[in-house]
């Protein structure tokens, strides 16, 4: 969910048709419409009926735009808000956008369902006291694997970063920050290191391993796994959880060295034309029944404790969706480390890909 940082888009065309059928529309944006909401989201990252239900209950119609990754979202709003009321950045980008004065403060007095949020999500390091963001979905990055062909549970990042056991049958994410951060975790460092020497070790590791990597997958590692093109895929847990519903031979694990815990958030960008409607939408999403519908469709972990209580055991007890407390303790949220570190990561990544 970083430049997925993100979601399987296998149902995008079907989802788009469904939205059109219930009157949800796409750009161009409209400003200052009393009954409008301009929503900028990852594609296929909303329940099938969420927006039509919102329109039925409030009379507010949603105009929907999609972005491919956090960089696109940030770049589009960096030069000024073209008219969006709600956006869905990931944790590290919430912090980055706050520092760039790109987000409105959220008025908690207008969010009657704040109490539905799990207490663990009320004071994140990237947005203390939830001044600028509301949690939407969360999850982990781990290894999706073909149980029969793998033969074991690949419980270490070594199988992806430093082994020839599955040579030619592994995929890594194509997003530099996540791949580098996980490499740091594997080597025993913090995922939020700023030490150039530690990044250099990850660079050398990946250059040596590159001959065994089939592909740095752009949002399709889960599909490569499902089709048998790879045996191991570094992926976001929800992507793997979706194909696990279709194939009992697919499983998911967070390696013993730990990984990244990510969070996607609802935010109101600066100069949003319909701030009141944005607050109404956030409050609507935090309803227990609406949160449950979202979670059931997306198959990521909900931070809405009231919604989770409505879900079945298959969802709420699935370790591919909700990692154990012990696993979570081994993981880190990524932080915004500044432009200098970001440039170092991109330069390192360029050398890895060119090697």
Image (cartoon, rainbow, N blue to C red):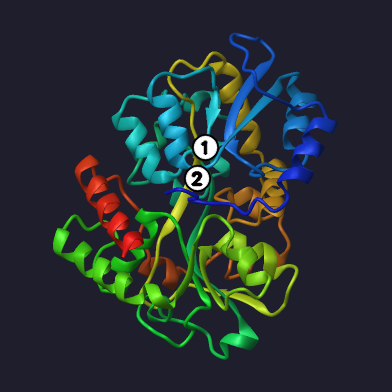
To which residue does mark 1 refer?
88
Report if the CB atoms under discs 1 and 2 are less than 8 Å apart: yes
Q: Residues within 10 Å of mark 1 (few under 14, many from 20)?
A: many
To which residue does mark 2 refer?
264
Residue 226, how many percent across, how many down? 67, 70
Q: Classify mark 2: helix, strand or loop.
A: strand
Q: Classify mark 1: helix, strand or loop.
A: loop
Farthest residue in the right direction?
21
Is 88 drawn above or below residue 77 in the view shown?
below
Is 40 drawn above or below residue 229 in the view shown?
above
Left or right, 98 with respect to 276, comes to left
Left or right, 325 with respect to 231, comes to left
In the rendered image, which quarter is residue 163 located in?
A: bottom left
**Observer-nearest of 312 and 93:** 93
Residue 111, how many percent across, how many down? 55, 29
**Which mark sits nearer the N-terminus, 1 or 2?**
1
Residue 78, numbered circle: none
Whether residue 103 is visible to the viewer of this picture, yes or no, is no
Residue 169, how many percent across, how many down? 53, 78
Whether residue 131 is visible to the viewer of this picture, yes or no, is yes
Left or right, 195 with respect to 122, comes to left
Which residue is depicted at the point 39% across and 66% down?
259
Which residue is depicted at the point 38% across and 25% down?
78
**Observer-nearest of 87 and 354:** 354
Which residue is depicted at the point 57% across and 91% down?
151
Residue 143, how many percent across, how many down? 51, 72
């Amino acid at each position: 969910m970083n430049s997925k940082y993100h979601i399987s888009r296998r149902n995008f065309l079907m989802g788009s048709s469904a939205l059109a059928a219930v009157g949800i529309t796409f750009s161009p944006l409209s400003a200052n419409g009393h009954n409008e909401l301009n929503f900028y989201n990852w594609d296929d990252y909303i329940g099938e009926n969420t927006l039509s239900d919102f329109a039925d209950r409030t009379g507010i119609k949603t105009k929907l735009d999609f972005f491919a990754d956090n960089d696109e979202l940030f770049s589009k709003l960096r030069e000024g808000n073209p008219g969006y009321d709600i956006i869905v950045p990931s944790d590290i980008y919430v912090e980055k956008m706050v520092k760039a004065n790109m987000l409105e403060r959220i008025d908690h007095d207008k969010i009657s369902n704040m109490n539905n949020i799990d207490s663990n999500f009320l004071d994140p390091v990237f947005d203390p006291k939830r001044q600028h963001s509301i949690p939407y979905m969360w999850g982990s990055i781990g290894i999706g694997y073909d149980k029969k062909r793998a033969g074991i549970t690949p419980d270490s990042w070594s199988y992806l970063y430093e082994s020839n056991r599955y040579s030619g049958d592994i995929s890594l994410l194509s997003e530099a920050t996540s791949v580098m951060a996980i490499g740091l975790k594997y080597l025993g460092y913090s995922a939020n290191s700023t030490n150039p020497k530690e990044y250099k070790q990850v660079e050398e590791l990946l250059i040596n391993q590159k001959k065994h990597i089939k592909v740095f997958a752009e949002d399709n590692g889960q599909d490569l796994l499902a089709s048998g093109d790879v045996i191991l895929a570094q992926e976001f847990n929800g992507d793997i959880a979706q194909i696990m519903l279709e194939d009992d031979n697919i499983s998911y694990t967070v390696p013993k060295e730990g990984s990244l815990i990510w969070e996607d958030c609802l935010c109101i960008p600066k100069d949003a034309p319909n701030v009141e409607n944005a607050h109404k939408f956030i409050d609507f999403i935090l309803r227990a029944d609406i949160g449950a519908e979202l979670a059931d469709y997306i198959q990521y972990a909900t931070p809405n404790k009231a919604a989770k209580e409505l879900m079945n055991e298959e969802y709420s007890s699935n370790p591919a969706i909700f990692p154990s407390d012990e696993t979570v303790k081994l993981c880190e949220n990524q932080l915004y480390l500044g432009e200098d570190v970001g440039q170092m990561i991109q330069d390192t990544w360029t050398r890895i890909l060119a090697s």
